[in-house]
Amino acid sequence: MSAAYWRRAMNTGLAAAARPLPLPKATASLARAATGLPTVDPYANSDAPRWLKFLWAHLSARHVFVLAFALLYPFFATPFFTFQIAGQALALGLIALSLTFLGGYGGMISLAQMTVAGIAGYVVSILGPSAQSISLAWPWWVVVPFALAISVAIATLIGWLSVRTEGIYTIMITLAIGVAFYYLVLQNYSLFNGFQGFQKVYPPVVLDVNWRDPLPFYFLALALSLAGYLLVKWLVRAPFGIAMQGIRDNPRRMAALGYNVVAHRVAAYALSGLVAAVGGILFTWYNGLISPNSVGTGWLINILVIAVLGGMRHPIGAFLGAIVFVLLQTFAIDVIDRERFNLVIGVVFLAIVLFSPDGLLGLWSKLRQRFGPEAVRRP
């Protein structure tokens, strides 16, 4: 079906649903007044770009605060916390965001997102400069588009193979693909350099800036993470995203309405592959290397843990889960042995699943409902 048909259908449905409920517009105005924002949308009757209207409609005080904190963070944090903690968390958050988009809005849990990210990292290492002689040392502006295109193609293939199944079968198929890729790069020396992988895979020096220095790398990761977050937020409100959520809830009914369920799911895999590929390139540049351990079973599961920790129904939850994961990974070894880190992650993961299936953001929402101002005003 065409996008125009989607828009007409959605606009008709929203208009019919909004007629007996005149309160949301007033509620939105009150909410904007409470946050100090103007109650009149200056772009409502203007020719402003759609992205500007989108930002204005969904901007709130907490978004401004989080963005201001993220921009100012490297100026009061140490280089260790800027690069090792924040930079790594942003890269992992992008990969987890791709899973959040698939699982939270499409109902498809894929364990191959780190595989797609690893493919992007390997393509950058093979085609770009590295310490290994088998690398081709192409310029970055050729290598990066190649890496993104190949990763999206592989993600589309993974989606085409797995979308005809549901539940545990999808998880097992994507896990099998991830394990197969791990053994491929482990045993192949002519292309992937075997268990050694590629070392000294650094971001390029552009505009006389070394983008692996803590401050430039942080802002590069922040810009790409913000772009990925806004892309997902826009997609889930677009006709395609609304159709995806309908397919998640009732694929049979959506198929009866004329939607191609398989095509929508494969397209969702392709879009998530793009986000995962960007995160995979960032993660490779952060580590300065890529090896079979980077795409092993442990990392396949870690991405799922990160997405679940933050909350699968919230795009920002991927980054929150990545921050918690990186902090535990960095500082848990000061309390316990490094070999027992997986035990700590397992305990935290189990506690989140038991007490808040919607992750840390779901737990925060429950606390606000119980102890926030709304609970005090409730009779």
Image (cartoon, grey):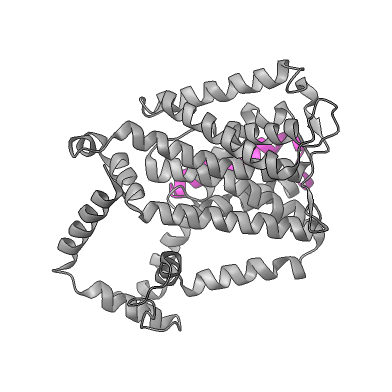
Question: What kind of secondary structure does the magenta stretch mostly adopt?
Answer: helix
Could you say which is closer to the camera, residue 74 or residue 237? 237
Could you say which is closer to the camera, residue 44 or residue 345? 44
Q: Position of residue 135 (x, y in %)?
A: 79, 29
Residue visible at 46% across and 71% down in the picture: 59
Q: Is residue 78 left or right of residue 145?
A: right
Is 357 within the magenta? yes
Q: Position of residue 21 (x, y in %)?
A: 18, 70
Residue visible at 36% across and 28% down in the picture: 166
Residue 316 visible? The answer is: no
**Magenta-highlighted residues:** 332-358
Q: Residue furthest top?
A: 187
Is 339 within the magenta? yes
Against 147, residue 367 (above or below) is: below
Q: Is residue 57 left or right of residue 88?
A: left
Q: Is residue 264 left or right of residue 329?
A: left
**Quarter of the figure that contains the C terminus:** bottom left
State which quadrant residue 79 falls in.
bottom right
Q: How many numbered marks are there?
A: 0
Q: Position of residue 258 (x, y in %)?
A: 21, 37
